[in-house]
Amino acid sequence: MPTESKPAADAQGYTHLRSHRYERKFLTEELLPCQVEALVRLHPLMFHAPYPPRQINSLYLDTAEMQNYFDNVSGAENRRKVRLRWYGALTGPIARPMLEIKVKDGLVGRKLSYKMASFNMDGDFCDRVLQEAAGRSDLPQVVRTDLRTLSPVLLNCYQRSYHATRDGRFRLTVDWRQDFYKINGALSNSLLHRQRNARDVIVELKYDIELEPRADRVAGYFPFRVSRNSKYVQGIERVYF
């Protein structure tokens, strides 16, 4: 295992994971999800599916100045994304949401995760509902304080399938059928104005930092183009601009 490194300046105070990891993203607009998964199964490393496919829902939070969005667009060396994530139905009672802070230090990143209290994602959802859930959650004080400076700005959901090598050292996900909704933290949200991206299929190859020398060979079998695709950035630009 690599030694523990210092957190990025904009994430100081968070309990961080022991290791960084690389994420290589690939994008295809020409292939169907089933065709992409067929190519994954043909890989010499014999990827298998450790989990069944499922729907992922992400509620992104940002500052009033949209600092996280602009840091990601500009490619800032140290940047982050803050989101609540849950699986299954997009709306209704959300029983087991996770608060995730994805921190990027240059080319590598890590993810900080905390259990959040349940809340309802319905027409009455707003910043007040989020802050009440945070108040009922067992969060470090620094995280609780940080959340008071953030508001919900985007809701995203998509389908994901999971793949991994037999030794678990390389993990791969395939994402498709993305939906985006604008969220107003101050008002109720009816989620009527959906923006759908039904064309793109996103492949992410994930591995620990010490495996970087092998990653070129692993990725070289895929006929996909490398992409800086960010669901958060794409969603913001679809629903706000």
Image (cartoon, helix red, strand yellow):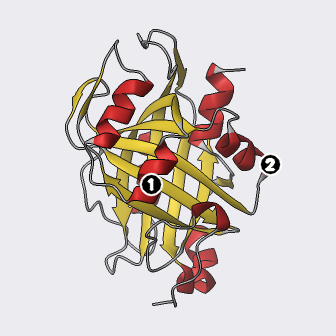
Foreground: disc 2 or disc 1: 1
Residue 33 at least partly seen: yes
Specify the amino acid type for callout 2. Ser
Q: Residues within 10 Å of mark 2 (few under 14, many from 20)?
A: few
Closest to the observer: 122 or 168? Answer: 122
Q: Quadrant of residue 219?
A: bottom right
Residue 173 at least partly seen: no
Residue 166, horizontal then vertical, whole percent: 31, 76
Q: CA distance from mark 2 to mark 1?
A: 25 Å
239 sits left or right of 148 in the view: right
Residue 176, horizontal then vertical, whole percent: 47, 37
Closest to the observer: 31 or 229? Answer: 229
Above/below status of 150 relative to 190: below
Closest to the observer: 149 or 34? Answer: 149
Circle 1 sits on which residue?
143
Question: Helix or strand or loop: what does disc 1 sit on?
Answer: helix
Circle 2 sits on which residue?
74
Question: Helix or strand or loop: what does disc 2 sit on?
Answer: helix
Above/below status of 123 relative to 159: above
Specify the amino acid type for callout 1. Val
Check contact, mark 2 vs mark 1: CB within 8 A. no
Question: Count the marks: how many?
Answer: 2
Above/below status of 157 relative to 37: above
> Label for residue 122?
none
Residue 2, horizontal then vertical, whole percent: 51, 89
Closest to the observer: 88 or 64? Answer: 64
216 sits left or right of 132 in the view: right
Residue 145, horizontal then vertical, whole percent: 47, 49
Residue pictured at 70% horizontal, 34% vertical: 65
Residue pictured at 77% horizontal, 54% vertical: 75
Residue pictured at 80% horizontal, 48% vertical: 74
Q: Quadrant of residue 233?
A: top right
